[in-house]
Image: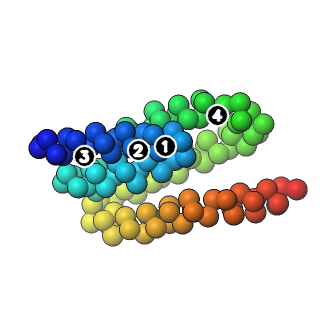
Amino acid sequence: MTLFEILLLVAAGFAAGGMNALAGGGTFFSFPALLAIGLPPVTANAPNAVALWPASLAGAWAARSSLRPLGPYLLPLLLAGLAGGLLGGLLLLAGGDDVFSLLIPWLLLLATALFAASPWLSRWLAARRK
C-alpha cells in the first residue's frame, strides 16, 4: 500500500466518522476510498460497515435523551434494522461483486435522494401522526 493510499484512507475514515456522528452518510466518504485503493465492492463494504458502527453508536448515545420519547418505536425500528442488515448482507454475499457493482450507483442515488428528502419526509410523517 502506498503512502497516498494510507493517507486517503485515514482522511476518509476521519471524514466518515465525523459525518456519521453528526448526520449520517459517512459511507459516502469511506466506501469510495476503499474502492479507490482497489478493493472489490463486496470486500470494501464489509470493513466500511464494521468501521463506521462505533460512530453510529456514539451518535445514538449522545442523542439518547432525544430518543427517550420515541421509546415504543425504538424496538420495532431496531428489529427492522437488524433484519434489513441481515437480509442485505446475505443478498450481498449471494450476488457477489458483479451484481453489487451494478447496484452501487443506484443504491447511492437512492441514499442521496432519501437524505436530501429527509426534511420533507419528516414533515409528512409528523403530519400523519397528528
Please tell me whether residue 122 is drawn above or below residue 67 in the rendered image: below
Point out the tag, 2 or 4, that comes first from the N-terminus. Answer: 2
**Are circles 2 and 4 on residues that touch, CB within 8 Å?**
no
Point out the tag, 1 or 4, that comes first from the N-terminus. Answer: 1
State the count of labels: 4
**Are circles 2 and 3 on residues that touch, CB within 8 Å?**
no
Which residue is disc 1 drawn over?
A: 20
Whole-number angstrom distance, CA of label 2 to CA of label 1: 6 Å
Whole-number angstrom distance, CA of label 2 to CA of label 4: 19 Å
Image quadrant occupied by the C terminus = bottom right
Viewer-proximal residue, 51 or 29? 29
Which residue is disc 2 drawn over?
A: 16
Amino acid at dot 1: Asn
Which residue is disc 4 drawn over?
A: 63
Disc 4 element: loop
Picture quadrant where residue 106 is located: bottom left
Q: Residue at x 70, y 36 (%)?
A: 67
Point out the tag, 4 or 3, that comes first from the N-terminus. Answer: 3
Image quadrant occupied by the N terminus = top left
43 relative position to 55: left or right: left
- The x and y percentages for residue 18 are 45, 40
Kindly identify which numbered label has been placed on residue 8. 3
